[in-house]
Image (cartoon, rainbow, N blue to C red):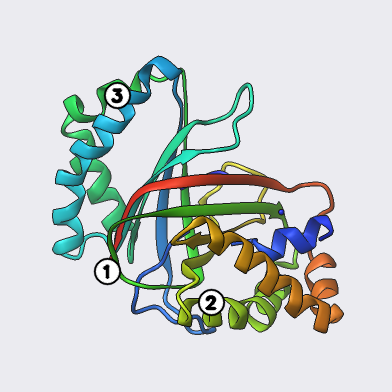
Amino acid sequence: MLKRIFVPVLALVALLLVSAPAWAQASSSQPPIFTYVSEWGVPRAQWGDVAKADADNKAILDPLVANGTLIGYGYFTNWVHSDNGYTHGDWFIATSVAGILKTLETVYSKPGVTAPVRAASKHQDYFMISTIYGGHSVTNSAGYIRVISSEVKPGKMGDFQDAYRRYIVPVYEQLLADGTIVAYQLDSEYIIENAPGRAFSVVVTKDAEGMDKVRAAVGEAFGKNPAAVESLISASVPETRDDVLARITAMTRK
């Protein structure tokens, strides 16, 4: 998925939110899952090529979900562009590094499928790890994804994750239960490309209204408990936030 809206860190945590498998329920003992995200800065004239490549890649990725190599994947279109930013992206998730690497080998063994996208003017990848996540099963579903990232102070990642579990996860579990969100996940980089200690929070909703409901629910929770805000702010580096808001064109997850 991805590179990386109350006060800056409240927004970070409120939506400091990448998809997760249906069997996952957030707890301190969750096994790690791995997410590989590719982003593309594609000239507008090639956007049709991206859509074709995504459709063709489904024939590759669906069997990998069926046989357990992957637990999910998705495609997205960035809806907040910048001059030098990324326009499109995709992700896939596995329970092991081997699952990610086998998927990459399979995709790159079929160059005709991805060649138009590889020819894009700009490209970057992320290799993430998460032990805090939750989600529902979906098949070929659309939706919206919001990713907010920020650096965590050296030595404070454990404190940040503990606060996230204590204050944020219960809110998202309730939103999962009532169907407002499809998935949430707090990632860090397994292969580090940014400053060490950057946290990526992802939330996935089934529709646009879900994004407003997420914002309202987190805001209400923090309004009732200012200590929750402080615990997250104190572990974060000021002015290091980065955002993505995107339309999911297709996603599948066990």
* Circle 3 SS class: helix
Q: Is residue 244 left or right of residue 62?
A: right
- Name the disc covering residue 254, or none: 1
- How far, Cα to Cα, is label 1 from label 2? 19 Å
Q: Residue at x 85, y 67 (%)?
A: 234
* Circle 2 SS class: helix
Q: Nearer the viewer, residue 252 or 142?
A: 142
- How far, Cα to Cα, is label 1 from label 3? 28 Å
Amino acid type, residue under disc 3 in the picture: Asp
Coordinates of residue 110 in the picture (x, y in percent): 16, 32
Q: Residue at x 26, y 29 (%)?
A: 114
Q: Residue at x 50, y 53 (%)?
A: 145
Q: What residue is pinned by disc 3?
A: 49
Q: Is residue 109 left or right of residue 185?
A: left
Residue 8 lies in quadrant:
bottom right
Q: Residue at x 48, y 53 (%)?
A: 144
Numbered disc in front, either 1 or 3: 3
